[in-house]
Image (cartoon, helix red, strand yellow):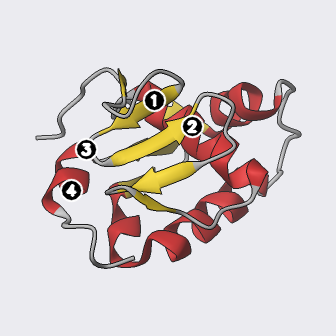
Amino acid sequence: MQTERPASRAASGTGWVAAGPLAVSDDAMKARFHGKDLSLTHAQRLILLALVKRGGRTARRSEIYDQAFGRRLEAGSRAVDTHVARIRRVLGPSGRCIVTVGRVGYRLDLDALERRNGSEI
């Protein structure tokens, strides 16, 4: 069963939001997985931050886009899907922790995040 936990402040100090070993700075200027910096664009970090803040709960594509960019997602837009695909690529095998919820959106599989050892990125 999927674990839902609220996002927490990363142990490295204030200004970071974490879900297990995945942490994103509040301003989305940096993202880390098991303490290693992730090479993501600002838009990708904004989307990752939106997912991390949900703490494993499913987020609709429109909610992710609105939270990340502060505006409504246009009907038929694949912007969120494209960014999520790129985030998964950067995470490598650990990218499977971003789960597609068919015809709805995405969620983080927090249990899968915590099982990864961080050496895969």
For residue 13, above or below residue 44: above
Sequence order check: which comes first, mark 3 or mark 2?
2
Asked if residue 102 can be seen in this view, the reply is no
Q: Amino acid at mark 4?
A: Ala
> Regarding mark 2 in the picture, which secondary structure is present there?
helix
Q: Residue at x 51, y 32 (%)?
A: 59
First of labels 3, 1 by sequence position: 1
88 up-or-down from 107: above or below: below
Q: CA distance from mark 3 to mark 1?
A: 14 Å
Residue 103 drawn above or below residue 50:
below
- N-terminal-most mark, 1 or 4: 1
Place of residue 28 in the rendered image (x, y in percent of width and height, measured from the top left) = 67, 39
Q: Which residue is mark 2?
A: 49
Kindly identify the amino acid type of the residue bearing the numbered disc 2. Answer: Leu
Q: Earlier in the sequence, mark 1 or mark 2?
A: 1
Label 2 near label 1: C-beta < 8 Å?
A: yes
Mark toward the viewer: 1 or 4: 1
The Cα atoms of the two marked residues, 3 and 2, are separated by 14 Å
Badge 3 element:
helix
Q: Which residue is mark 1?
A: 17
Which label lies toward us, 4 or 2? Answer: 2
Q: Position of residue 112 (x, y in %)?
A: 21, 56
| Mark in front: 3 vs 1 | 1
Amino acid type indicated by mark 3? Leu
Q: Secondary structure at mark 1?
A: strand
Circle 4 sits in a helix, a strand or a loop, which is it? helix
Q: What is the number of the mark on residue 110? A: 3
The reply to whether callout 3 and callout 4 are in contact (CB within 8 Å) is yes
The residue sitting at 57% across, 64% down in the picture is: 87
Neighbours of disc 4 within 10 Å: few (<14), some (14-19), many (20+): some
